[in-house]
Image: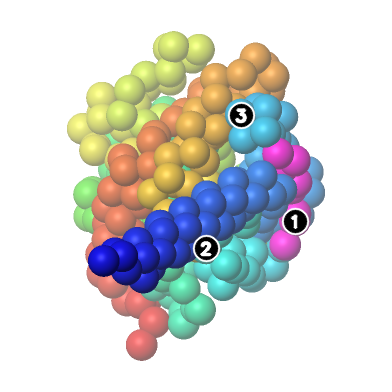
Amino acid sequence: MMKSTKGAAGRLVSVIAVAATFVTLTGAAEAQSNRPVTIVVPFAAGGGTDITTRAMQEGMATSLGVNVAVKNTAGAGGTIGVGEVARARADGTTLGMAPVGPLTTQPHLRKLPYDVDSFDYICLAYSAPTVIAVRQDSPFNNLEDLVKFAKENPEEVTFAVQAIGSIPHIAGLALEDASGIKMTYLPVDGDGPALKALLDGTADVFIPHVSFFTSNSEQLKSLALLAKEKLAEQPDLATAAEQGYDLDFPIWGGLVAPAGLEDADVTRLDTACKAAIDSAPFQAQMENLKQPSAYMNSADFGAFVHEKYETNRKLLEKAGLLAN
């Protein structure tokens, strides 16, 4: 009696089908990982965030084995470009160099098409300490001088800030909260206009990043470095912590992707980010900018952003600035 070959044939077809599916999925994954990557910078070309991103291009391209392009999408304080990333397909081909403001303060100030959970976090890429700066001839020589005067003269200290909700503004709110003072905020269009306001007497104080301060140190003096530790490059800059105020407000940014990436893509992109930051061209650019290098892996960066998001929300809420 002949055995039926129907069962064996069916099993063979199933094996072939599974194998074909595996080959298809593997091929699709490989094809996806071989596609070019675009990094969206949410500001115009030539700024610090743009320069830092472009310094990472070569290292990331080498690590990933694909072309890496930078696209500038400026507007609305960086929220247009960051929103573009949030809406992109979560396939590892679109990233954003997202700064602190658009990630952790702007979503609290107005309705945006994204929030802190709209992204997968790849890596911290840069972190520039900030300085509370005054004119060289200012009567303030340290934080206590400023705080004492501000307590005796409420709202008479004028603080030039880039925008409501910017990191300098958040740092000012934190100083007010920690010391019990009240200052008057003067919106300006950037560090250059803030410096001009200081020099012409329109403003008394502002908070630039440390490289801007260093470049203009003949006209400025520091009341406090807003960082956890002193800078090895500038050990003469006293920190706020040394003066009794726990204030740490760097201007930072990192690579993000639309939420929903495969774990393997997150790992691959994080590895490429680390390779780029460790590369000689990137380190040379950071030295040229007088900016310390910084890196956090995906998990640490994600936790860090969520922590800062909540910290900044509380400060804005206390100042009555949260969006309804």
Q: Residue at x 65, y 14 (%)?
A: 280
Q: Position of residue 159 (x, y in %)?
A: 50, 54
- The local secondary structure at tag 2 comes to loop
What is the residue that sits farthest to the bottom in this orientation? 324
**Is 195 in front, or is 323?**
323
- Sequence-first disc among 2 and 1: 1
Residue 103 within the magenta-colored segment of the rendering: no
Report which residue position mark 1 lands on.
Answer: 72
Q: Which three-letter amino acid code belongs to the residue tagged 3?
A: Ser
Q: How many marks?
A: 3
List the residue tagged with mark 2: 90
Residue type at tag 2 = Ala
The colour scheme is rainbow
- Identify the image quadrant of residue 143: top left
> Residue beneath label 3, please?
63
**Amino acid under disc 1:** Asn
Instruction: Please tell me whether mark 2 or mark 1 is closer to you in this view.
Output: 2
Q: Residue at x 53, y 68 (%)?
A: 86
Q: CA distance from mark 2 to mark 3?
A: 20 Å
Where is the N terminus found, in terms of image quarters? bottom left
**Whole-percent x and y of residue 23?**
53, 52
Give the CA distance from mark 2 to mark 1.
20 Å
| 1 and 3 marks in contact (CB < 8 Å) | no
Judging depth in this view, the residue of 313 and 254 nearest the camera is: 254
Callout 1 secondary element: strand
Q: Residues within 10 Å of mark 2 (few under 14, many from 20)?
A: some
Whether the magenta-drawn stretch holds residue 67 is answered as: yes
Residue 167: give x, y in percent of width and height.
46, 52
Is residue 3 visible to the viewer in this orientation of the structure? Answer: yes
